[in-house]
Image (tube, rainbow, N blue to C red):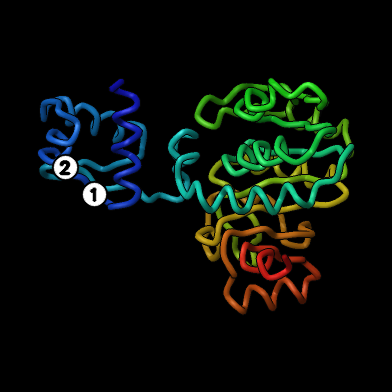
Amino acid sequence: MLALERRNQILEKLQSEKKVVVSELSQLYDVSEETIRRDLEKLEKEGFATKSYGGAVVNETLGIELPFNVRKNRNVSGKQKMAEIAASLVEEDEHIFLDASTTAVFVAKALKECRKRLTVITNSMEILLELSDVSDWNIISTGGVMEGRYLAFLGSRTDDAIRSYYVDKVIFSCKALDAERGMMESQELLASTKKTMMDSGRKNILVAEGGKFDKAAYSMAGSLHDVNIVVTDRKPAERWLRLFEEMGIECRYPEDRATEE
């Protein structure tokens, strides 16, 4: 196992269990305790962990963003269900934006299974690779500065490219969702790009896991007034459903779709 792969697995374990023990990790990965300590030191330098006696605890600072490949492997089943719903909202021959979220990657995969002709504009390197084998679609990259942690193009050039289009639908996610503050992101550049996308689409579709509701993050990415449809992986709390109804936001989730079928 490569050191990077091992550290990503340790990071996933930290996220789920909140702490790890050096001796247990040493046995789990069949490496020396000194190797594990170096792994934890690197995770601490990157801001993901805080070393403690005999191990480490997770750093839950709001501004910390997990590596793309770690986030992509979390709640895969929920993301697949949301992606199927989001894909069903897209019609043949439409022009859409897909943001650089891990959730949007799953939407891209779902769209490949059900749509023959689309124009997809994205700032996601992962989505560009995912759609590289699709022959009947028009795939457009925004370009910009490549940010490796997000596998995304970000910055002023990216936002300028997005402003040059007006699409049928914008499909995007967020790090956190608050009833008053709206969508939030861990970094300003991510928030700026999402705002620009929402301003450049006829209909905005937020695809967000239930675990992101009632959470906060560092940078504001847009108001709920900018959203037309919310797709999530489970039925939201009644107060959220009332809020969506009051704001004229359609809410879709797996149970709702199953009932309709």
In which quarter of the view is residue 261 placed? bottom right
Q: Which SS class for mark 2?
A: strand
User: Which secondary structure, mark 1?
Assistant: strand
- Residue positioned 61% across, 41% down in the render: 106
Tell me the residue that label 1 is attached to.
19
Q: Earlier in the sequence, mark 2 or mark 1?
A: 1
- Crowd tier of the residue under label 2, counting other residues whose Cα lies within 10 Å: few below 14, some 14–19, many 20 or above: some
Note whether 213 is above or below 5 in the view shown: below
Residue drawn at point x = 64 percent, y = 41 percent: 104
Position of residue 41 in the picture relative to residue 121 (left or right): left
Disc 2 marks which residue?
A: 55
Compared with 114, 179 (above or below) is below
Identity, as a three-letter code, of the amino acid under mark 1: Lys
Quick one: label 1, few (<14), some, or many (20+) residues within 10 Å?
some
Instruction: Report the residue at 69% width, 26% height from top.
Output: 131
Horizontal and vertical percent for residue 81? 60, 53
Count of all numbered marks drawn on residues in the image:
2
Q: Report the amino acid beneath label 2.
A: Gly
**Tag 2 near tag 1, CB within 8 Å:** yes
Vertical comparison of 206 with 56: above or below? below
Position of 29 compared to 242: left or right? left
Distance Cα–Cα, label 2 vs label 1: 7 Å
Residue 207 percent coordinates (x, y): 65, 52
Q: Position of residue 199 (x, y in %)?
A: 82, 46
